[in-house]
Image (tube, coloured by chain):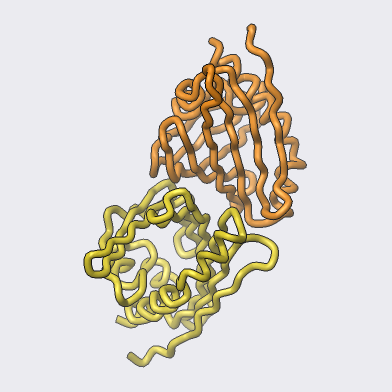
Chain colours: A yellow, B orange
Amino acid sequence: MTTKIHETEIAIDPEVPLVRITRDFDAPVANVFRAHTDPDLVRQWLGPRSVEMRIDHFDCRTGGSYRYLHIRGSDEFGFHGSFHEVRPGELIVQTFTYEGDPDGVALGRIMFTDLGDGRTRLTSTSLVDSFAARDAFVASGMETGVRESYDRLDDVLAG
Amino acid sequence: MTTKIHETEIAIDPEVPLVRITRDFDAPVANVFRAHTDPDLVRQWLGPRSVEMRIDHFDCRTGGSYRYLHIRGSDEFGFHGSFHEVRPGELIVQTFTYEGDPDGVALGRIMFTDLGDGRTRLTSTSLVDSFAARDAFVASGMETGVRESYDRLDDVLAG
């Protein structure tokens, strides 16, 4: 691995219950985008290193949906949602529910920006309907999972 | 028509960019719910009286999606989204984009509450990612459309 590890910035919005995550990758937009839409690639990086990902379905197109499990030992954590809009190389808008909190739902937006020289900036936002829910999400230790996911994504993109 | 016209309450949340709409109906939960999920019924009430609704697809189940047009003379207004979760008689969580503003998206939640005596309370929330977007939505004249829709839904439920 010669890829430099970029920092993952995680910021809470001061005005609305939203988290904004920013991360650069040393790979072209098309590759970073494909690593988000191809379940065989997604499975290799989405989640902390301590879990194995099992995909129930992952139909990443406008109007599609997904469900997957993160498995750690005998524990299974389910996640599901819909792909509201998928614009190749540009944007993914999706919903997200952690099944341990089945009434909770986040609206996510992942934007892919071409930085030139084969580099890409990923900007990912998650919107929920209360500051308490947003702050609980941030306090849940998601930062470790997000940073590890993107470090793993570096490996997938370099591989 | 002997159905009493109930008032539609439209309130903006003071803390988050959300609109909350509340409306009672003199019909059982199962009927009000079916009028939201059966496209042949939805077509009869969703939208102001001045438009005709043409459904492209309307697959109201968890993981499904929809697209429809409102048509007024030669003008067509498209709307599309995903059904994140559909719990019969209880809840519909969906996304919503007006195609005239293709980057805008709302996360909607429709809750069905049994008030007893064959009456139902509908509580519908729409969450967006900025107060400016929320206030523009409210200022757009949506109130007339929402009130007319629910008055039309009274007629469908009584019919």
Q: Residue furthest top?
A: B2
Which residue corresponds to the image point at 41% horizontal and 72% vertical from the top-left? A32
Q: Residue furthest front?
A: B116
Residue A139: x and y in percent read: 51, 70
- Which of the image's four quarters has the C terminus of chain B? top right
- Which of the image's four quarters has the N terminus of chain B? top right
Residue A85: x and y in percent read: 48, 52
Residue B146 figure quarter: top right
Q: Residue furthest bottom?
A: A2
Which residue corresponds to the image point at 77% horizontal and 42% vertical from the top-left? B139
Q: Nearer the viewer, residue A133 or B156?
A: A133
Which residue corresponds to the image point at 57% horizontal and 38% vertical from the top-left? B78
Which residue corresponds to the image point at 48% horizontal and 38% vertical from the top-left? B92
Tally the numbered discs.
0
Instruction: Kindly tell me whether residue B72 is visible in this rendering.
Output: no
Q: Is residue B93 left or right of residue B77?
A: left
Q: Is residue A119 left or right of residue A131?
A: left
Is A54 rendered above or below residue B68? below
Is A18 rendered above or below residue B39? below
Q: Residue furthest right?
A: B139
Residue A125: x and y in percent read: 55, 64
Residue B108: x and y in percent read: 56, 43
Q: Nearer the viewer, residue B79 or A69?
A: A69
Instruction: Kindly tell me whether residue A7 is visible in this rendering.
Output: yes
